[in-house]
Image (cartoon, rainbow, N blue to C red):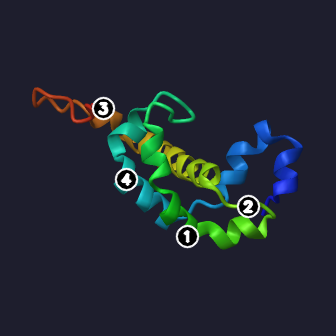
Amino acid sequence: MMTKEEYMQDSNKNYAEYHRQFVTEAVKAIVLRAIGLGPIVGSPDFYLNDVYIQKWEALHEKIKALTFAQVKATGNWFDVYVSVSIAKAAAREIQATELDRISQLRPFADIGCGFNLLRIEK
């Protein structure tokens, strides 16, 4: 487990790894329900800043309930910034998984039915 001290040695480099360590299936489920698959998969921004910050901040108490002990164990405090960063790390994992799944389906996307099965709209 990466500690806050290790994270702060190079916070730009360690940002994603540090927050990703708190992501669980339960955290991903909360993020997916609150944000939705479309905005997550459709976001071109690594930081998902095209999703309103209020949506991320609204997850604070739920993310805190699931990850507080682990975050404290790294020597960090828990605030909205930490919960938003964990939620966005979860969203990036969802995004990567879904984009990988979609890329595997791509050969079957157009089956001649007059529409594309992989059409994703925001």
Other-residue count near label 2 (Cα within 10 Å), few / some / many at <14 / 14–19 / ≥20? few
- In which quadrant is the N terminus drawn? bottom right
Q: Position of residue 9 (x, y in %)?
A: 89, 45
Q: Quadrant of residue 50?
A: top left
Other-residue count near label 3 (Cα within 10 Å), few / some / many at <14 / 14–19 / ≥20? few
Disc 1 residue type? Answer: Leu
**SS for dot 2:** loop
**SS for dot 1:** helix
In the image, residue 86 above or below residue 46: below
Q: Disc 2 versus disc 3: distance between alpha carbons?
A: 35 Å
**Mark in front: 2 vs 3:** 2
The residue where tag 4 is placed is 34
Please give the name of the residue rendered at 55% of the width and 70% of the height, measured from the top-left corner: 66
Disc 3 residue type? Answer: Lys
Mark found first going from the N terminus, 1 or 4: 4
Mark found first going from the N terminus, 2 or 1: 1
The residue where tag 1 is placed is 66
